[in-house]
């Protein structure tokens, strides 16, 4: 058998898996991996249960069950004024992560170059999946503390081999919500250089302090060069379901579907039916989700501030960025290892969300997930304060 070591060592273990293992080993409160600690709406779960019992439970259509594709199209029209044909412009995948893999496989050609611009810090899967598809990562750093977009850096990253801009708003890991001006700046470059935009919008319904999510696909001329991705896992606090949905023009969705058919082919039909039901909920549900998450953000922010952390703005997502410099620390990786074992709280070093070509990523920031019950957030803040004050 061929030596598989080069293949195995070419992929690193996700930072989320590393920190979750540390949390388990140390019986720590896990504010590292981004998932809620309560299940989503009971009515949505009940629809899934009933659909499982009633069946059918065989392969659904590769593109997704018609009810979910229609519900996704209806939701995009209702929330953003975007019109998509559920027949050939909506694709259902095994979570948004599989949609990303399908997009990179479809739009980047192995052995023929193909660069993808990625704003960092970024969800670390982007880097690995782009390179796994044969592409080249061209990172563009966002500038702390407000994670501002540097248009000069964006221009410098775009070259003749650039094929894609990967956009994530609201941003995992730092909670930035791209402004209208930010989106227009990205759209301007996409149009000037004839680029596809892969837009990860899974936290679309978690924008805080009166902000509203904007999709770059709604900007002039951008619908035809954008695939935008949503996630039932995030929208309904059901991350284990792994149901995602992508909207875009037929030629882009068709290319993604041809990749998708050889990845997972389809997702469970009962879960798809339940997500279709959920997407048809009225505005009050989505507004309530944002309000609940904002309250959790504020609760953890107060606790971390009282413990001595610097707390950066979090405009959306599940995540809060804490500055450890005021505590006298400058190594986020070591800090996270210590608090997992000593304070019994797990976080994630933000330096892990930068590409390997960045020789000096910020090392004083830690990401904490606040999508947890109040008692859990309070206990985590108390443990950190006690450890810092020891």
Image (cartoon, grey):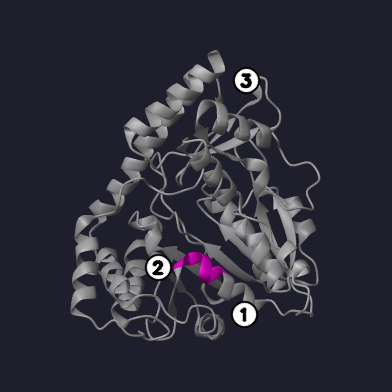
Which type of secondary structure does the marked residue at label 3 adopt? Answer: helix
Note whether residue 258 is visible. Answer: yes
Instruction: From the viewer's perspective, tell me whether residue 29 is left or right of residue 349.
Output: left
In the rendered view, tell whether residue 235 sits above or below residue 143.
below
Image quadrant holding the N terminus, namely: bottom right
State which mark lies toward you, 1 or 2: 2
Residue labelled with disc 1: 106
Which type of secondary structure does the marked residue at label 2 adopt? Answer: loop
Residue labelled with disc 2: 243
Verify CB contact (< 8 Å) between mark 3 and mark 2: no
Is residue 323 one of those drawn in magenta? no
Instruction: From the viewer's perspective, tell me whether residue 270 is left or right of residue 300.
Output: left
* In front of the other: 369 or 222: 369
* In front of the other: 277 or 133: 133
**Disc 1 from disc 3: Cα separation:** 46 Å
**Disc 1 from disc 2: Cα separation:** 20 Å
Rendered location of residue 288, percent (x, y):
28, 47
Q: Earlier in the sequence, mark 1 or mark 2?
A: 1
In the rendered view, tell whether residue 23 sits above or below residue 117.
above
State which mark lies toward you, 1 or 3: 3
Q: Name the magenta segment's main secondary structure.
A: helix
Mark 1 packing: few (<14 Cα in 10 Å), some, or many (20+)?
A: some
Rendered location of residue 352, percent (x, y):
66, 46
Which type of secondary structure does the marked residue at label 1 adopt? Answer: helix
Q: Earlier in the sequence, mark 3 or mark 2?
A: 2
**Disc 3 from disc 2: Cα separation:** 40 Å
Rendered location of residue 262, percent (x, y):
54, 83
**Residue 327, label in figure:** 3
Q: Earlier in the sequence, mark 1 or mark 3?
A: 1
Which stretch is magenta? 95-100
In the rendered view, tell whether residue 296 sits above or below residue 238.
above
């Amino acid at each position: 058998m061929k030596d598989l070591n080069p293949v195995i060592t070419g992929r690193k273990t996700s930072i989320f898996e590393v920190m979750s293992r540390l949390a388990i080993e140390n019986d720590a409160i896990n504010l590292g991996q981004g998932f809620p600690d309560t299940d989503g709406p009971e009515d949505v779960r009940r629809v899934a249960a009933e659909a499982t019992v009633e069946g059918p439970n065989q392969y659904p259509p590769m593109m997704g069950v018609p009810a979910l594709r229609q519900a996704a199209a209806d939701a995009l029209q209702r929330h953003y004024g975007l019109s998509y044909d559920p027949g050939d412009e909506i694709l259902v995948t095994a979570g948004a992560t599989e949609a990303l893999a399908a997009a990179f496989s479809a739009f980047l050609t192995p052995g023929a170059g193909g660069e993808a611009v990625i704003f960092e810090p970024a969800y670390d899967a982007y880097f690995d999946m782009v390179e796994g598809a044969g592409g080249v990562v061209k990172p563009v750093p966002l500038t702390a503390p407000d994670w501002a977009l540097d248009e000069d850096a964006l221009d410098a990253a775009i070259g003749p081999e650039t094929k894609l801009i990967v956009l994530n708003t609201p941003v995992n890991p730092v909670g930035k919500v791209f402004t209208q001006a930010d989106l227009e700046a990205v759209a301007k470059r996409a149009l000037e250089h004839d680029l596809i935009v892969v837009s990860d919008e899974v936290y679309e319904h978690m924008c805080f302090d009166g902000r509203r999510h904007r999709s770059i696909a709604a900007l002039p001329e951008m619908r035809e060069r954008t695939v935008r991705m949503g996630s039932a896992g995030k929208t309904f606090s059901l991350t284990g379901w792994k149901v995602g949905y992508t909207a875009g023009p037929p030629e882009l969705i068709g290319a993604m579907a041809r990749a998708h058919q050889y990845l997972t082919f389809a997702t469970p039909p009962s879960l798809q039916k339940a997500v279709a039901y959920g997407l048809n909920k009225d505005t009050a549900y989505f507004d309530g989700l944002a309000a609940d998450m904002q309250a959790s953000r504020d609760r953890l922010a107060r606790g971390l501030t009282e413990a001595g952390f610097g707390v950066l703005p979090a405009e959306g997502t599940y995540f809060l960025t804490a500055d450890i410099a005021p505590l006298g620390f400058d190594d986020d990786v070591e800090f996270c290892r210590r608090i997992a074992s000593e304070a019994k709280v797990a976080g994630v070093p933000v330096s892990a969300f930068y590409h390997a070509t960045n020789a000096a990523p910020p090392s004083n920031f830690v990401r904490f997930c606040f999508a947890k019950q109040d008692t859990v957030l309070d206990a985590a803040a108390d443990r950190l304060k006690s450890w810092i004050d020891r």
